[in-house]
Image (cartoon, rainbow, N blue to C red):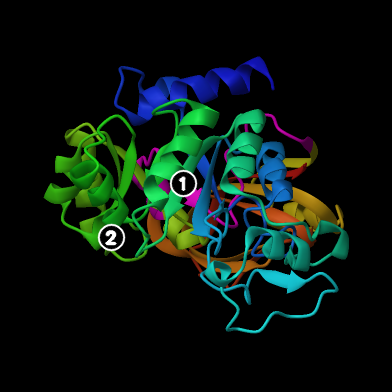
Amino acid sequence: MSKRRLLGLLLLPCIAAGCTATQGDAGRHFIAHRGVNMRCTLAGENSREAIRLAARAGFDCIETDVRWTSDSVLVAVHDATLARTFTYNDGRPVPEEIAVADLTYAELRDKFRMKASRPESRSRVLSLEEFCTECRDCGLYTFIEPKAVTPEWVYPQLIAIADRVFGRGNYVITSNNEANDHIRQEMGIQDIPLMGILYQSTYGHIASLGNIIMAISATRFGEEEYRANVSRAKSDGFQTESHADEFKHFDRINQADIDYVSTDLLAPDYTGQGKTLYRSKGRNAAKSAAESAAVGKMEFGAVYLDLEWSGSATITLVDQKFALPATATPRRARHQLLVFDNVPAFEVSSPSEDFRIKRISLRIVQL
């Protein structure tokens, strides 16, 4: 593990607990949602490969989920059933009705593989302890989500595992307000950071739990309400989190100064990771489009767009198409996507008559 990544890992629990380090000191943090798996194509969700790809891509945080087998082993699995994220060993699909909780840990490991596009990327399920240990070794600050309607016996086992691997308070329990209430109110635990989802509960209730990150949805709130919630959380001294995969939500996050960005598809901020294959500067969109396409298909990489414009137009970046908001005065926006087995395409189309590019920067990185 690099000294830089280790230092970041040690600082993150202090940031989550509200220590004196400022955002300017630490920067914002990107959470690889269930690891870098690109929706079960590049790697399996919550797999060892997805963890390592997250570290390789430049993420400093990761999120996982907790389910339990019939013999009470905690495993890093999101869904209650296997159909979406698993195959049989030979690649056959798994019937909808097969549930994680109906299988022993040995059965889950020996009969099934995590779903991925390439057979060589399909690996066995990880226990929660294996997942956490890999995250620790990769220097990833870990967010752990117990699912709704979690049996009470799961919580002390989950906490014991996380404490053993990371040390008390050096991780976050996240995304399930039912779990947060149980940990604070029933178990009386105050020294583990929690992340509370605002749309699941009231602001006041989440804030009352203490030692929390306020998760504010960029998709479920309108723009004004979103900004008001972020402003309130900031003024009250809370760290904030939002999820984004598309431009319109990421643009909202960029305007709001969010601390933790959770994502399935975005690339983390560029900090020197990987090998830069192409970088453009200036305002010639056609030239940038042609040169980015010339890079060709990439197995695994990232593309970063930083654009300042007036007017309106439609942008294609890799496999996403989005509209730039119409503006009479120059406005800046960014988008950044992971690339798997695809061409890092960039294109400007349907420009308005008054569309002008003041500045454009495009970076393509092989990871």
Q: Does residue 55 belong to the magenta stretch?
A: no
Q: Residue at x 34, y 58 (%)?
A: 217
| Span of residues in magenta | 252-275
What secondary structure is marked by label 2? helix
Query: Which of label 1 and label 2 is nearer to you?
Result: 1
In this view of the protein, which residue sits in the foreground, 28 or 189? 189
Report which quarter residue 119 is drawn in: bottom right
Tell me which amino acid carries mark 2.
Glu
Q: How crowded is mark 1: few (under 14 residues within 10 Å), some or many (20 or more)?
A: many
Residue 156 x, y percent position in the rendering: 38, 43
Is residue 49 in view from this perspective?
A: yes
Tell me which amino acid carries mark 1.
Ile
Q: Name the residue under label 1.
A: 144
Q: Residue at x 64, y 42 (%)?
A: 130
Report which quarter residue 221 is drawn in: bottom left
Q: Name the residue under label 2.
A: 223
Residue 159 x, y percent position in the rendering: 42, 39
Q: How crowded is mark 2: few (under 14 residues within 10 Å), some or many (20 or more)?
A: few
User: In this picture, is 340 found above or below 262?
Assistant: below
Quadrant location of the N terminus in the rendered image: top right
Residue 338 x, y percent position in the rendering: 67, 53
Residue 33 x, y percent position in the rendering: 54, 52
What secondary structure is marked by label 1? strand
Mark closer to the chain start, 1 or 2: 1
Report which quarter residue 194 is drawn in: top left
Q: Which residue is drawn at 25% across and 42% down?
A: 187
Q: Residue at x 77, y 57 (%)?
A: 123
Residue, far front: 71
Is residue 58 in view from this perspective?
A: no
Q: Does residue 266 belong to the magenta stretch?
A: yes
Side (left or right) of 302 relative to 154:
right
Badge count: 2
